[in-house]
Image (tube, rainbow, N blue to C red):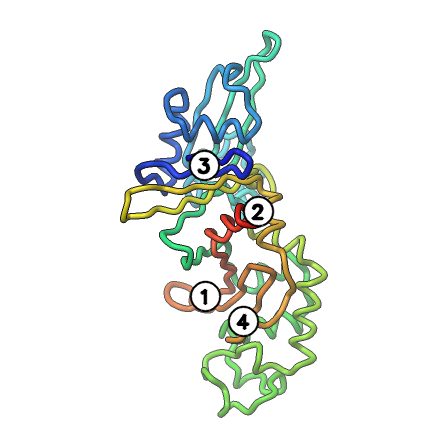
Amino acid sequence: MYNFEFGSRTAKGGFANEKAICKKFNNWREDEDAKLWLKIMGYDLDKIDYLRAIQLSTRIKKSDIKKFGFSDEEYEKLMRFKKTDVQVQIRLIIHMNNAMKVENLSLKKANSDADYNQVDKRWVGSYKEMWHFDDEIALALRLFTGEISPSTHPEMLKVSLSQLRDLRRVFLTELKDNIVQKIILFFTENKILVVSDILKGRGGFAADWMLVTRYNKSDNTTTWILKDINTAMNFFGQGDVRVSPKGSLYIGRITMQRKGGTPDPTKLQFKIRPCDLFKLEDSK
């Protein structure tokens, strides 16, 4: 079953990982899903001469970066803003001339509508360098993640230390109201930049497309939806910036919270529910 208008389909079998997606692309002449993905991307299948899909590891070796057409000097920036999981290289025959195109895909997988997917995590200092918020916001976010103990800055709190829900960190509902409003204002005014950085990235490994796959074990089917990255960003960024009931931050459909767990429990992380993208179908 395929819905071309919405770029979605339910197919037999499971293929909710990068390796399987690459295999399908590389078998595009026989694979019906891959044919549809290429059509959604705007390609005329009859004009494709060559196609190769490559799985990109989370951290590409510096020695391999030239294989992708980049210099050693570009390496750190590429890795810092990388959002691509699979790169599809396509050579087209157009008026007897070869034209090489590259499509970068960000893959999001889930087993149910409730699954969250971490889309970005870094130290607060890294986000400060990227987005240039001031020292007071940086301090508040470090208190929020627990990178800095609340006991070192009680003047930032609107409750006493003994009233904190967790002595290791501060929830936004426990910070002074004027500081919380300052955080909300910053993320409201810079929402486009923030959403773009955490979903699309920057540079040569920025994502062009988001492919969400949802596997159903009961009937061994995978439902997928493929959207250009601007559509995905508009969808997940839609909505106000506001404090969540649990004291984290909502940026539209994106949640900003303390990472917790191991490793790096005091990093800041951003999460989405990738299966929410299927709601685009329901809204039509």
Q: Gap in Å between the C-alphas at discs 3 and 2?
A: 17 Å
User: Residue at horizontal 60%, vertical 40%?
Assistant: 203
Task: Tell me the kind of residue under disc 3.
Answer: Val
User: Residue at horizontal 50%, vertical 53%?
Assistant: 276
Q: Gap in Å between the C-alphas at discs 4 and 3?
A: 31 Å
Q: Earlier in the sequence, mark 1 or mark 2?
A: 2
Would residue 29 appear left or right of 244 to someone viewing this image?
left
Q: Where does residue 159 sit, x and y in percent of width and height?
A: 57, 89
User: Residue at horizontal 49%, vertical 68%?
Assistant: 258
Pointers 1 and 3 in contact (C-beta within 8 Å): no
**Camera-side residue: 145 or 165?**
165
10 Å neighbourhood of mark 3: few (<14), some, or many (≥20)?
Answer: many
Name the residue tied to disc 3. Answer: 86
Name the residue tied to disc 1. Answer: 259
Q: Earlier in the sequence, mark 4 or mark 3?
A: 3
Q: Earlier in the sequence, mark 3 or mark 2?
A: 3
Task: Tell me the kind of residue under disc 2.
Answer: Ala
